[in-house]
């Protein structure tokens, strides 16, 4: 069984060079990142930049404590990583191997399948159902009964919905092995999950600094779980995958969640405005609990994405043989950026 390869997104510099446009005209609608500046961060980094001759402390204790305080738990339940991506890879490394199985409802975040197959375990992707992408509760529950790992993305990327608590509990109860809630977008629904972690010794919840906190460039994420799962993940964690500067900035941000919360409120409002603009274009917009919108644009989705890219507007497409072939996904950006997207769609849509 060969693992699907990582697919790198083209860089803004490459896109600008290819289409002959200035790089500052390129807007990333494809990565679910934040439009807000991190102008508060240099004050933290500058004094630190004098001590980069030393390694970061591999325990990352101040970062764990900050994450624990933010989430309402204690440090022994937290494992830090270079983004949730690294945490996903650590979970696969700790729990998957040939002869083992992982399952997920699909479409979902592609790294679950890649990480599973990298360890030569079987990946069971259970398709969501119908035009509303209903959650395949029964089939996923059955798959969880025989899976060492069940991946749940809540809210889901790329659909944007947040499944019901009852379904999450049903999957956790049915699961033979570990259940992972990837809560990368949880700040947009104000979900914290710590009480669930306390109730379920088989649950791992993953949080990131990349989305609502607006710090994707730092590469910091963490898991929250029972202390014994945390020990098992720590045992396969590389000692220094988070730079000292990233750890310091993330620690500060976690103790000041008000900035992030204010920005979430603004993004949610802007999400409504962008959804309205897309609806006025006659497009079907899937209701979203995140900082992005999944939108049905029809069979010309890929050529439309090319035309937008030539304008410097980079959007997310999906495989032409899959459920989302006719869809594009748009990150909610700043109002003037979203206006550029809507204007371009008016020009390019048939
Ligand atoms: C569901 C989900 N999980 C994880 C990630 C990656 O998060 P990080 O930047 O913390 O590695 C993403 C990024 O798009 C995501 O959508």
Image: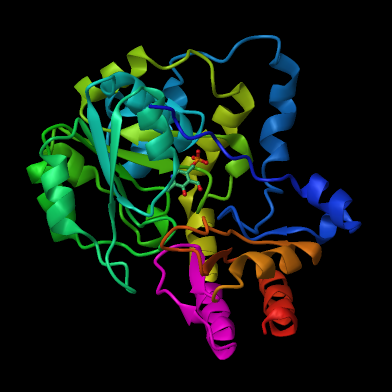
Q: Which of the image's four quarters has the C terminus?
A: bottom right
Q: Which of 111/2 is in front?
A: 2
Q: Residue at x 35, y 65 (%)?
A: 161
Give the left or right position of residue 247, taking residue 79 as reference. Answer: right
The stretch in magenta equals 269-297
**Residue 68 position in % (x across, y down):** 34, 35
Q: Which x, y percent locates residue 45?
A: 69, 31
Instruction: Please state, as top left, top right, bottom left or bottom right, where the N terminus lies in the image.
Output: top left
The residue under the point 54% across, 55% down is: 259
Is residue 64 visible in this depiction of the protein? no
Which of the 4 image quadrants contains residue 56?
A: top right
Residue 251 visible (yes or no):
yes
Name the one closer to the observer, 282 or 298. Answer: 298
Q: How many marks?
A: 0
- In percent of the image, x 22 and y 22: which residue is there? 99
Asked whether 96 or 318 is in front, the reply is 318
248, 199: nearer the viewer = 199
Does the magenta portion include 91? no
Q: Is residue 79 left or right of residue 38?
A: left
Q: Is residue 173 left or right of residue 286?
A: left
Residue 71 position in % (x across, y down): 33, 43
Q: Is residue 305 above or below residue 210?
A: below
Q: Is residue 133 above or below residue 194?
A: below
Task: Tell me residue 145's x, y (percent).
Answer: 10, 39
Scheme by which the image is coloured: rainbow
32 in relation to 202, above or below:
below
Q: Quadrant of residue 222?
A: top left
Q: Is residue 272 magenta?
A: yes
Query: Compared to 126, does 90 lie above or below?
Result: above
Lateral position of residue 239 relative to residue 341, left or right:
left
């Amino acid at each position: 069984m060969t693992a699907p390869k990582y697919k790198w997104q083209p860089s803004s510099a490459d896109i600008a060079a290819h289409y002959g446009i200035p790089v500052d005209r390129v807007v990333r609608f494809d990565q679910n990142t934040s439009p807000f500046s991190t102008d508060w961060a240099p004050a933290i980094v500058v004094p630190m930049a004098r001590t980069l001759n030393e390694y970061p402390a591999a325990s990352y204790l101040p970062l764990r404590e900050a994450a624990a305080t933010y989430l309402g738990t204690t440090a022994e339940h937290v494992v830090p990583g270079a983004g949730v991506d690294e945490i996903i890879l650590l979970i696969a490394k700790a729990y998957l191997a040939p002869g083992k199985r992982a399952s997920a409802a699909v479409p979902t975040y592609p790294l679950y399948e890649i990480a599973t197959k990298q360890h030569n375990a079987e990946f069971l992707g259970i398709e969501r159902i119908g035009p509303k992408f209903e959650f395949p509760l029964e089939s996923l529950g059955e798959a969880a009964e025989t899976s060492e790992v069940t991946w749940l993305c809540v809210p889901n990327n790329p659909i944007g919905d947040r499944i019901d608590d009852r379904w999450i509990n049903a999957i956790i109860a049915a699961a033979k092995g570990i259940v992972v809630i990837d809560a990368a977008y949880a700040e947009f629904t104000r979900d914290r999950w710590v009480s669930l972690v306390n109730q379920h010794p088989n649950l791992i919840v993953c949080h990131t600094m990349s989305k609502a906190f607006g710090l994707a460039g730092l590469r910091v994420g963490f898991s929250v779980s029972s202390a014994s799962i945390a020990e098992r993940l720590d045992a396969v964690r590389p000692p220094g995958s988070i730079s000292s500067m990233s750890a310091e900035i993330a620690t500060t941000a976690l103790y000041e969640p008000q900035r992030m919360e204010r920005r979430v409120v603004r993004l949610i409002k802007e999400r409504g405005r962008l959804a309205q603009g897309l609806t006025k274009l006659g497009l079907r917009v899937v209701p979203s609990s995140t900082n992005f919108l999944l939108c049905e644009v029809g069979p010309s989705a890929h050529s439309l994405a090319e035309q937008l890219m030539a304008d410097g507007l980079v959007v997310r497409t999906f495989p032409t043989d899959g459920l989302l072939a006719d869809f594009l996904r748009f990150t909610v950006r700043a109002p003037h950026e979203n206006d550029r997207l809507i204007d371009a769609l008016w020009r390019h849509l048939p």
